[in-house]
Amino acid sequence: MARTARPQPVITLTTDFGLQDPFVGIMKGVLLGRCPRARIVDLTHAVPPGDVRTGTFVLLTAGRFFPRGTVHLAVVDPGVGSDRAALAARTLDAYFVGPDNGLLSWALAAASDVEVRRLEKSRLWLQPVSATFHGRDIFAPVAAHLAGGGDFADVGPRVENWARLAWPEPQPIRAGWRGEVVYVDRFGNAITNLPATLALEPSPPAHLRLPHRRRVRLGAFYRAVPRGQPVVVPGSSGFLEIAIHGGHAAKTLGLRVGTKVTFAK
């Protein structure tokens, strides 16, 4: 009877390293050296430098589209070399590896059966450990260990407390919801924390009110309005997003992460 081949392990990478320097390639070299069968997927290396909150949103919205058992390795780590802890987490569907600075917190809050361990077993790491490149020396070796089928308990002791970034919950108001922009993509679309399902609610028609009381109507897609006009669409991330047909909504409308918006009927 023929044996069923084991699926190749998948490791995703999310960093603020960019692609100008060799840092991403070096991490991939460590991953493949420790787990040669791994398939490595670049989620993004364009997180703004040190912007933990943006990296957190990337993990929250992207992780669910990968096969069960995927290892999500994330390094947005302005505290590298300090006394901040390093973490690995196991959920019902995936593993997460990264610094204990809130980077993993939104993805873990949305997951089931979460177990978190602090990375303390230095025998798994590259030696000597650089004070400036834990992505290479600590996180990548641990991610490869997990992708290769290594025991999760081997990475270090279990912990119950770790850094969490608070998710900005939408607030109910009279005849609507108050929310805020949580992410701006490279097209200038401003993604809010308001669930896309609000766009599916029955009439009367709704709109999003921006600062300076400007109103933007809902549309099913970006070209639902004339070129140059703003529109609010149910985005692929599962949240309402503010766009401009053929333009950059964030720059044109003065939107940035934290900008308050109101969904109203």
Image (cartoon, rainbow, N blue to C red):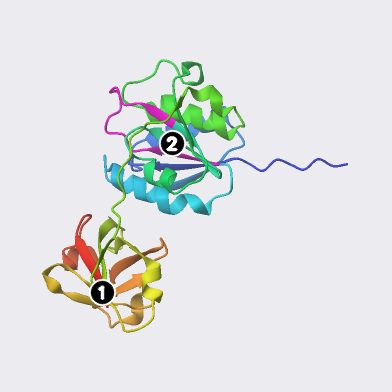
**Residue drawn 35% across the image and 46% down it:** 56
Magenta-colored span: 70-87
Give the residue type at disc 2. Gly
Q: Quadrant of the N terminus?
A: top right
**Farthest residue, direction front:** 174
Residue 202 horizontal side relative to residue 172, left or right? right
Q: Position of residue 174 (x, y in %)?
A: 23, 71
Q: Quadrant of the C terminus?
A: bottom left
Name the element at disc 1: loop
Q: Is residue 133 magenta?
A: no
Q: Position of residue 158 (x, y in %)?
A: 47, 26
Residue 57 horizontal side relative to residue 180, left or right? right
**Residue drawn 32% across the image and 66% down it:** 241
Label for residue 175?
A: 1
Q: Is 55 or 17 nearer to us in this picture?
A: 55
Label 2–label 1 contact, CB within 8 A: no
- Residue on which disc 2 sits: 25
Residue 46 visible here: no
197 in relation to 151, above or below: below
Q: Is residue 74 magenta?
A: yes
Q: Position of residue 205 (x, y in %)?
A: 31, 82
